[in-house]
Image (tube, grey):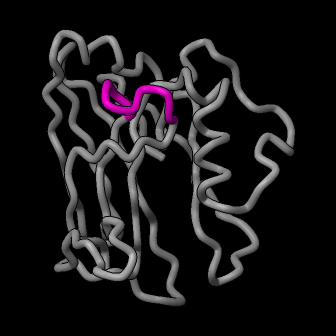
Amino acid sequence: GLLDSNGAGQVSAAGWADTTSYSGVDKALSSKPFSEYLGYSFRISPHVSKRAERYIPTKSGSTAVPCSFNWNGLKYPNTALSKERLATNGCFEAPTGKWTDLRLEVKRESSSEAVLTMAMGKVSYTHRQRLSREEEKRFPSKIDTVLIEYPNGRHFEYIKLGPVQSVANSTMYV
């Protein structure tokens, strides 16, 4: 997620979530300081097809989403990595075993409009969010937190983040 800590503070030590389960991490992210954060999250499955679509598997009954733009707005205001989906789309078909950069962007167009972008390789998705007056209060004023939650089925040892770049019009690239 690209988030504004909103004066709630940030985690400064290990042990903030004594769990490795998604439900345990989700519970921790619904507690302070995270419950006060404002911003967006991006669901990304890098190797999944560009043609993949949202569906509901019969066996589990839960929604399977390849890639999506999410917001912790009015529907789920107390969850840092909200599941309030703004838009769903296919993913990136990233090749395995090859370094591929991911770019996430939140750009404020006006007090009531934001443009979100996720791009990897030669594939890019954009969503334009138009905010109601009530929703405008939930728009982040700054991005000072990057929050990553990922399954580690391939036993990665680390995630490497590139330099953060701020550019004109309050855009931040990670």
Where is residue 22? Give x, y as percent.
60, 59
Q: Is residue 149 shown left or right of residue 67?
A: right
Where is residue 12? Give x, y as percent.
81, 32
- In the rendered view, tell whether residue 21 sits above or below residue 58: above
**Residue under the image location 85 percent in, 44 percent down:** 15
Where is residue 41? Give x, y as percent.
42, 45
Picture mark count: 0
**Residue under the image location 33 percent in, 44 percent down:** 70
| Secondary structure mostly taken by the magenta-highlighted segment of the chain | loop
Q: Is residue 98 shown left or right of residue 23?
A: left
Image quadrant assignment for residue 65? bottom left
- In the rendered view, tell whether residue 125 sits above or below residue 28: below
Q: Is residue 50 shown left or right of residue 139?
A: left
Q: Is residue 1 shown left or right of residue 12?
A: left
**Residue under the image location 39 percent in, 58 percent down:** 43
Asked whether residue 64 is drawn in magenta, I would say no
Front residue of 2 and 19 = 19
- In the rendered view, tell whether residue 127 sits above or below residue 139: below
Q: What stretch is highlighted in magenta?
A: 72-79
**Residue under the image location 30 percent in, 49 percent down:** 69
Asked whether residue 77 is drawn in magenta, I would say yes
Where is residue 165? Give x, y as percent.
48, 38
Front residue of 99 and 153 = 153
